[in-house]
Amino acid sequence: MATRMLKRSGLSNDLCEQLKRHKIESCKDLLSLTPVEVMYAAGLSYDKACVLLQSVSKAVAPPVTTALELLKQQSCCSTSLPALDKLLRGGLPRGTITEVAGPSGCGKTQMCFMLSVLATMPKSEGGLDSSVIYIDTESAFSAERLVEIAQSRFPGYFSCKERVLHMAGRVHLFRELTCQDVCNRLDRLEEDIISTGAGLIILDSVASVVRKEFDTTLPGNLMHRCNLLGHEASTLKYLAHQFNIPVFLTNQITTHLGGQGSEVDSGFVTAALGNTWSHTVNTRLIVQYVDTHQRQILIAKSPVAPFAVLNYTIEKQGICMDGDDSQETLYEGTDPGLQPIRVQTGFSYNLTT
C-alpha cells in the first residue's frame, strides 16, 4: 500500500533521510512526484530517479499468494469463547477486519478487553504471545477492568502479579478523540506495529468520532464522511493483510427510518455507518438484548460461518456463553444484519430508539 513508509521499501537509511528533509516519508509521497522532482530531492541522476520510482512501485504492489500458502498459515485467533470459535472455524480471522455492532451495555468493550488479555498470553495458553494496539475513541478504556477480566477469566495463569503487570504492559493504548487524530494514528500504525510487536489491533469505536463530527444532513458532509471511512478501512485492511493479524472494531447503532408502506413504518435499529461501510468489514457480529440479564450475539456476516445466534451474559470474567459451549443455534429467518436490533429502553426492550 502506498502509505508504507519508505524505510520499509528497501531504501537505504541515508536516502530516506535525504528524502525526509524534503518531507517525503511515505511511498505515496514519493510516487506522487515526477522523475525530475525525485532527481532534485534525492540528489540522483534522472535515470537513477526513474529506477528508484520503479523499485518503490514494485515494493508497494500487492503480493501474489496461493491457496496452499494460505492453508499453511495459522488462519484464526481464538476468542476464548468455544461456541463462537467453533462457528467461526477457529475464531477471529487473521488478515481481515471483524466488527461487533450493538447498543450500549451489551459488552462490546468487554469483548475488546477479553481479546486484549488473550492476545498477550503465550501460544501454549491459546494466546498470540504478542502486544496489542488499542485505539480508544470514547474514553471507555479501563485498566482496572482489564486486570479484573484477566484474573477472573484465566485465574491459573494470572495467579502471580508479575504476569498481570507483563500483560498490562503489552496493551498499548492510544486515546484519539477526533477524526483527524484517528486518521493520523492509523497512518502511523505500521511503525507502531513493528516497534511494539503487535499481533492484534482494536479500534473502539469506529463510529464514535465520525458521528460526532459529521452531520450528514448538511451538504457535502456525507461525501466527506464516506471518504474518511474509506481511508480508515483501506488502511486497516492493508495492515491486517501486511502483518497477517486480526483487526477488531466496535460499531454503534442507529435508527433506520421506514418509509410509507414499508414493513416497519416507525423505523428500526440497525448498525451505524450505512450500507457502504457494512461491505468493508469481513466479519460482522451483532450483539443485542434479550432481557435485563441475558444478551445475544449473532453472526450476521462471515465468509465461513452460517447465520447463527448464541446467548451470553456479562460477568466478572467478561462474556460468558450460556449452556453447553458446543451448542450451535442457527439463525432462523433472513439475514440477521437486515433485522432490527433489540435495545434497552428503561426496563422494556424495543425495536426502535
Image (cartoon, helix red, strand yellow):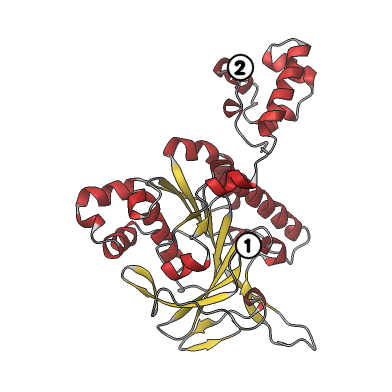
As shown in the figure, which amino acid type bears the numbered disc 1?
Answer: Pro
Q: Which mark's residue is nearer the viewer, 2 or 1?
A: 1
Residue 250 position, x and y percent, is: 53, 62
Which image quarter is the C terminus in?
bottom right
Q: Quadrant of residue 263?
A: bottom right
Residue 203 position, x and y percent, is: 52, 55
Residue 286 position, x and y percent, is: 55, 72
Q: Can residue 152 be seen in this view?
A: yes
Question: Would you call the spot at circle 2 few (<14 residues within 10 Å), some (14-19), or many (20 or more)?
Answer: some
Q: Residue at x 60, y 52 (%)?
A: 179
Q: Nearer the viewer, residue 309 or 220?
A: 309
Tag 2–tag 1 contact (CB < 8 Å)? no
Q: Which of 128 and 293 is in front in this view?
A: 128
Which image quarter is the N terminus in?
top right
Decide if residue 46 is on the left or right side of residue 183: right
As shown in the figure, which amino acid type bears the numbered disc 2?
Answer: Leu
Decide if residue 110 is on the left or right side of residue 298: left
How far apart marks 2 and 1 lie (CA) works out to: 43 Å
* Residue 15, disc: 2
Q: What element carries label 1?
A: loop
Q: Which of 173 and 279 is in front in this view?
A: 279
Furthest toward the front, the residue is 68
Decide if residue 325 is on the left or right side of residue 263: left
Residue 129 position, x and y percent, is: 37, 46
140 lies above or below 160? below
Mark 1 = which residue?
A: 303
Q: Residue at x 48, y 60 (%)?
A: 90
Specify which label sits upstream in the sequence, 2 or 1: 2
221 lies above or below 254? above
Q: Residue at x 45, y 35 (%)?
A: 195
Question: Would you call the spot at circle 1 few (<14 residues within 10 Å), some (14-19), or many (20 or more)?
Answer: few
